[in-house]
Image: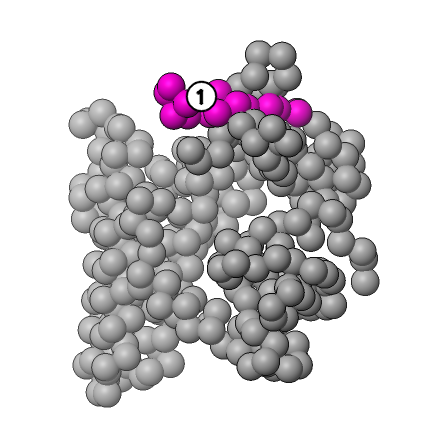
C-alpha cells in the first residue's frame, strides 16, 4: 500500500479535530485502501490523547474504536450508512447545484410511487411520474439554451429540447451516448405508462434509467460549465488539492495547489486577515492566482 502524503494525513486530522471537541491528535496511520462496488475508501487509525477513532473516507466519517474494535466492522457499517444516504439522495438533491432540480423532485415522487406500488397499474403510474420528471427538464433547458422563439420546440417535446441541449453542452462520445440515452429513456417511460402488465422489475428499470439520464444531463452541463478539472503540471495527475494552513503569526493563511501523486506544489499564495474589513485579502508580496480565501 502506498504511503500517504503529509497533507493527506493533515486533512484527516483536521477533519477529526473539526468533529471532536477538545481533542489532540497523537498518531495517524492509514491502515487500508479498498473498494466496495467500485467505490474507493481509505481507512485511517487516528489516536488522540483521549480516545481512538477509525476515519473512513468517501464520504468521510469517523467511528469510535470502542464501538467498532475492528476496522472491517466499521467499514461495513460505513458502507451501509452511505448506501442509505445515497438512497435518500435519489430523491433529495441540492436544488442549488442542479440545473434540473424540479426534475429531480419529480423523480423523487416516482421513487415514492414505486415504494408504495402493489399492482400493475401502480407500476404504470411510476412510468407517468418518470415521464413528468423528464418533461420537467424542459424549462431549465430553455433557460440554458436561450433559443429565439422561432427555434423553440413545443414544451411537450422533451426529445427535441434534450437533443438541442446535448448538441450544445456535450462533445464526441458523450454527445452520442447522451442522445441515444435521451431517446431510449423517454420511450421506456412512455412504454411503461401504457403497459397493462407492468411488473416491479419494469418499474425499477424505468426509474433507474430516468435517474441515470437526469444525472447524465446534469454532468454534461457541469462539465460544459466548469471545463477541464485541475491537473498537476508535473505528472498530469488529477489528485490535486488546495492545501493550506495558518502561518505562525496567526493572521495569515498560506496555501498552494499540491499533487498527492508526486507531491509537486505550485501557485503559492499568502492571504492576510484584515480586521477592518473582516475578510481575507492576498498579500501583495507573495500571492498568486487561483484558489479561494478561507472563511472569515
User: In terms of image quadrants, where is residue 118?
Assistant: bottom left
Q: Residue furthest top?
A: 284
**Residue 272 visible in the shown view:** yes
Q: Where residue 120 appears, x then y in whole percent?
A: 23, 84
In the foreground, 106 or 230: 230
* Principal secondary structure, stretch drawn in magenta: strand
Left or right: residue 190 versus residue 296 is left
In the image, the segment drawn in magenta is 267-281
Q: Which residue is mark 1?
A: 274
Q: Where residue 194 appears, x then y in whole percent?
A: 22, 72
Label 1 Cα neighbours within 10 Å, binned few <14 / some 14-19 / many ≥20: few
Label total for image: 1
Which residue lies at the image location 28% right of the left edge and 62% below the top edge?
A: 107
In the foreground, 53 or 4: 53
The image's colour scheme reads one colour
In the foreground, 275 or 151: 275
User: Is residue 55 on the magenta stretch?
Assistant: no
Amino acid at each position: 500500500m502506498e504511503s500517504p502524503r503529509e497533507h493527506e494525513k493533515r486533512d484527516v486530522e483536521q477533519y477529526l479535530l473539526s468533529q471532536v471537541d477538545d481533542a489532540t491528535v497523537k498518531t495517524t496511520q492509514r491502515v487500508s485502501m479498498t473498494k466496495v462496488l467500485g467505490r474507493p475508501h481509505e481507512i485511517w487509525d487516528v489516536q488522540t490523547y483521549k480516545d481512538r477513532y477509525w476515519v473512513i473516507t468517501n464520504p468521510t466519517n469517523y467511528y469510535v474504536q470502542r464501538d467498532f474494535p475492528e476496522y472491517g466492522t466499521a467499514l461495513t457499517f460505513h458502507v451501509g450508512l452511505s448506501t442509505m444516504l445515497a438512497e435518500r439522495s435519489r430523491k433529495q438533491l441540492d436544488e442549488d447545484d442542479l440545473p434540473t432540480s424540479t426534475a429531480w423532485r419529480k423523480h423523487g415522487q416516482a421513487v415514492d410511487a414505486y415504494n408504495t406500488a402493489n399492482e400493475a397499474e401502480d407500476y404504470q403510474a411510476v412510468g407517468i411520474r418518470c415521464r413528468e420528471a423528464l418533461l420537467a427538464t424542459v424549462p431549465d433547458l430553455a433557460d440554458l439554451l436561450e433559443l429565439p422563439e422561432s427555434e423553440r420546440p413545443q414544451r411537450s417535446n422533451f426529445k427535441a429540447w434534450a437533443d438541442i441541449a446535448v448538441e450544445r453542452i456535450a462533445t464526441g462520445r458523450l454527445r452520442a451516448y447522451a442522445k441515444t440515452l435521451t431517446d431510449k429513456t423517454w420511450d421506456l417511460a412512455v412504454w411503461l405508462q401504457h403497459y397493462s402488465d407492468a411488473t416491479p422489475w419494469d418499474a425499477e428499470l424505468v426509474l433507474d434509467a430516468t435517474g441515470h439520464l437526469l444525472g447524465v444531463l446534469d454532468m454534461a452541463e457541469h462539465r460544459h460549465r466548469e471545463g477541464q478539472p485541475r491537473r498537476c503540471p508535473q505528472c498530469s495527475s488529477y489528485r490535486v488539492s488546495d492545501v493550506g494552513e495558518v502561518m505562525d503569526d496567526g493572521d495569515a493563511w498560506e496555501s498552494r495547489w499540491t499533487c498527492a501523486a508526486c507531491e509537486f506544489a505550485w501557485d503559492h499564495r499568502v492571504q492576510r486577515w484584515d480586521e477592518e474589513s473582516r475578510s481575507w485579502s492576498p498579500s501583495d508580496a507573495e500571492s498568486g492566482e487561483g484558489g479561494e480565501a478561507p472563511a472569515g
